[in-house]
Image (spheres, rainbow, N blue to C red):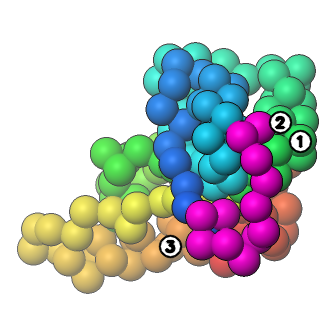
């Protein structure tokens, strides 16, 4: 690690994206440059939601503890959280649940979710759908009732 700094140091609060092939590579880069806040997306490539086994998740948790990282899973903005169409709405919930579950397994503190696209003549319906999706309790095996990665 490049060095350690006080948590009240402004630099401690700066973050970076995990912009490497894997989040593990991104965390190694962050450690070498003394970043502590790291966000990444789990939609494609080696970090895709369906690529994580328990050993890999445990490895990321160990890196978080070792380097005092604050990890964030950043969902894809192309997923419209304001969707109300029956099948698409169910897909949005499944996507959010998968990201919340991964965040919990990795020990991430947060999940960033975009509020959705609110255009068309049905703006109020879209706004309500967005709020409903975000407020709905997670239905994943490892998601807590409150705290990290809950929809509160």
Which residue does the image show at 31% across and 45% down from the upper left?
Answer: 78
Residue 62 drawn above or below residue 3: above
Q: Are marks 1 and 2 in contact (CB under 8 Å)?
A: yes
Report the quarter where the N terminus lies. Answer: top right
Task: Give, as a single range, the part of the protein colored magenta.
Answer: 1-12
Residue 132, numbered circle: 3
Helix, strand or loop at disc 3? helix
Q: Earlier in the sequence, mark 2 or mark 3?
A: 2
Q: Residues within 10 Å of mark 1 (few under 14, many from 20)?
A: few
Viewer-closest of 76 and 19: 19
Report the quarter where the C terminus lies. Answer: bottom right
Residue holding disc 1: 66
Residue 94 drawn above or below residue 130: above
The image position of residue 146, as x and y in percent, is: 81, 72
- In the image, taking residue 68 as reference, residue 89 lies left or right, namely left
Which residue does the image show at 15% across and 68% down from the upper left?
Answer: 119
In three-dimensional space, the C-alpha distance between marks 2 and 3, rounded to whole angstroms, equals: 34 Å
Instruction: From the image, state whether disc 3 or disc 1 is nearer to you.
Output: 1
């Amino acid at each position: 690690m490049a060095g350690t700094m006080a948590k009240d140091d402004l630099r401690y609060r700066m973050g970076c994206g995990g912009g490497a092939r894997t989040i593990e590579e991104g965390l190694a880069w962050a450690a070498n440059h003394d970043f502590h806040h790291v966000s990444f997306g789990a939609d494609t490539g080696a970090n895709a939601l369906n690529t994580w086994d328990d050993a890999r998740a445990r490895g990321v948790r160990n890196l978080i503890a070792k380097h005092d990282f604050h990890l964030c899973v950043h969902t894809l903005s192309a997923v419209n959280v304001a969707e109300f169409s029956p099948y698409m709405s169910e897909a949005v919930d499944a996507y959010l649940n998968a990201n919340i579950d991964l965040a919990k397994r990795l020990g991430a503190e947060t999940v960033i979710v975009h509020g959705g696209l609110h255009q068309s003549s049905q703006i109020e319906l879209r706004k309500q759908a967005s709020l409903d999706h975000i407020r709905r309790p997670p239905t994943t095996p490892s998601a807590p009732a409150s705290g990290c990665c809950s929809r509160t």
